[in-house]
Image (cartoon, coloured by chain):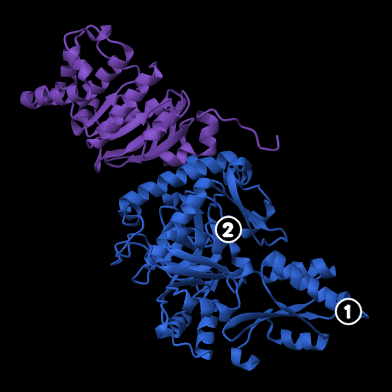
Amino acid sequence: MRLFNRRYETISRDDIDQIQLERLQSTLNKAYKNIAFYQGEMKHRDISPRDVSSVKDLSKIGFTTRDDLSYNYPYGLFAVPLRDIVRINSTSGITGKPTVIGYTKNDLGVWTELISRLYTGAGVTADDIVQMSFDFGMANWGRSMRTAAEHIEASVIPMSYLNPAKELMIMSDYRTSCLVTTPSHALHLSWLAKEKGIQVENLNISRAILVSEPLTDADRSRVESGLGVHVSTAYGIPEGMGPGIAYECGEGRLHISEDHFIVEAVHPETGNPVAPGDEGELVVTTITTKAFPLIRFRTGDISRIIPDAGCPCGRTFSVMDVPMERSDDMLTFRGVKVYPDQIKSVLADVLGEAPPFVIEMYKVKELDHMDIHVEEGEALFSDTIKRLENIITRIQGDLLELLGIRANIKLVERSTMQELLEGGKQVIYRDTLSKE
Amino acid sequence: MIKVRNLSTYYRKIRALDNISLHVWPGEIVSLIGANGSGKTTLLNNISGVVPFHSGQISINGTDVSRKRPEDIVSIGVSQVPEGRQVFSSLTVLDNLKLGAYLRYRKWQRQAISEDMESVFSVFPILKERLRQRAGTLSGGEQQMLAIARGLMAKPKLLMLDEPSLGLAPKITMEILEVIVSLKEQGLTILLVEQNARAALKISDRGYVIETGSVVIQGEGRELLGDGDIKRAYLGRDYREFWE
């Protein structure tokens, strides 16, 4: 079994405990010194970094939420001066302003290392031809996936979203051996391959790495049979290091890079740590990130962490389940994470106030689609169709620009909205069949 | 090799070390970087048992050595080369070296000791030339070499060096650092405290930056050389934001 970083990936429990403690302590010391928010949070609880003398003591420190990240816009949570920052990424925040994430040169190196472990775990080597496909809103993850693929010296075809038929053509003609994309896009491609009568067994492709969406077992096997590939996945958060937190090995186990992250599972309501192996909300602390450290960040993802898994692959890192549920109402649309509240604030910005709306998610040809039904209330009352069309275009433009999603806006009358809202849910999932 | 967890040390009421954790893996060179008074020397003195600490654990190869006496720690395989060399200036070079092997004489290892002395001379040929000279008559660089050689005579697995470049000309400093690298190549593990941060980090596998008794930055040597905070604080780069 190939490893990317033998020293760390096969580290003993005692050594990883030592390293996590050291790195946690220096992260806390630095955050306390340089970031007013974290210092304030710790002072509020009457503690200081000195009170942390084991990884377990982390629970003395309060959580950091997505709200906290948004309120400290733009640079409030940076631990280094801007001149040390070499890349600034944004993800859509929840207050209408984006969350700004900075990386130092060293941070980017760590990021590349983490994704290189993912590729190696998936069996990708310098002999592979890696084809990428990421939508507009996924540019940051796409970039890190590309950099790491180049780092392990694979041949990389770094595409953004092309016409899917063209992607299949490239996959066939360029002899792609590994596809890197989101689960939904891979499903769409395998649907299209079947539709076009492409014999997948004649393709060179043998692997797919699917990131940024919860990958169900059913979808995994559909992609595996549809494209004739072995599927690997990873776990990460948009607030730092792309899909770099955990990566799947050849045994299909999702290993947490514990030399760079401390991941806890807590009860979503009480915030208390759950028993090892029990389900809980994942809470992430970065311990090597220099520019934008996260301390006890509530991810909203529900999963289990299994310590000391004794994986036959040789990696000693703890293992987690692919998170399938959320502790909040976040949606994943073609890999992009979005909250209904974010859509609401886009509507409010354009219309002055947000009218009642319902988000409808469905798949066409295995590809995610989103319709946003907006009630035609007073805010939208208008005499000219042209003006209405204008408003719709603006909303769609803002959704794409601010949140990175392509959605259809449908204006509906009040009575229709009442019907849509009957189930009491703001987000409706429709089966593919009933839509087509 | 060595693991330090949550070490805190006080000099009366003054906190010198504040919850410090660090480790050195076998065969590594690890540097401690920090301003004067940040606690680097205290840390070495805690490990070697010369200065007692208030709380925390130190383990060497899995054995807890937290409250051991200095001579026990030397016999476990830890040698300290103190700041300012501290050679016995009225004794000859030879006697200084013999004193380095003091614990081993008691164990009747005379034959092995004289072999080790030969191998020390292969690292520092100048000492063989000066063997009968009093240590106080040596130059600063030679005294530093003698101090390191004396440390090696105890046949350590971990060598701790405190400011080996102190007061030495740049050329001599380079020579000393080259010796440290060659000792690592022979399998020795090295914990290095050094004012000259750039030179130390260049030869180090990893480093820790200590500020007022706490570790604030750590990482691989070349990573730390590129770290903005270290450049500003220890490598003499300026401090402003770019709009200032």
Residue A435 is left or right of residue B145, and the answer is right
Q: Amino acid at mark 1?
A: Lys
| Residue B222 x, y percent position in the rendering | 43, 40
Badge 2: few (under 14), some or many (20 or more) residues near its Cα, within 10 Å? many
- Picture layout, residue A395 above or below residue B125: below
| Residue B207 x, y percent position in the rendering | 40, 37
Q: In the drawing, what numbered circle is on residue A239?
A: 2
Residue A371 is left or right of residue A348, and the answer is left
- The chain drawn in purple is B
Residue at numbered disc 1: A386
Question: Foreground residue, B68 or A344?
Answer: A344
| Residue B177 x, y percent position in the rendering | 33, 27
Residue at figure coordinates x 57%, y 81% from the top left: A165
Quarter of the image where the N terminus of chain A is located: bottom left
Most extreme residue toward the right is A383
| Residue A238 x, y percent position in the rendering | 57, 61
Residue B165, visible in the rendered structure: no
- Picture layout, residue B158 above or below residue A263: above
Q: Chain of mark 1?
A: A
Disc on the earlier residue, 1 or 2 = 2
Residue at figure coordinates x 62%, y 72% from the top left: A329
Q: Chain of mark 2?
A: A
- The chain drawn in blue is A
Q: Secondary structure at mark 2?
A: loop
Q: In the drawing, what numbered circle is on residue B62?
A: none
Q: Secondary structure at mark 1?
A: helix
Q: Nearer the viewer, mark 1 or mark 2?
A: 1
Q: Amino acid at mark 2?
A: Glu
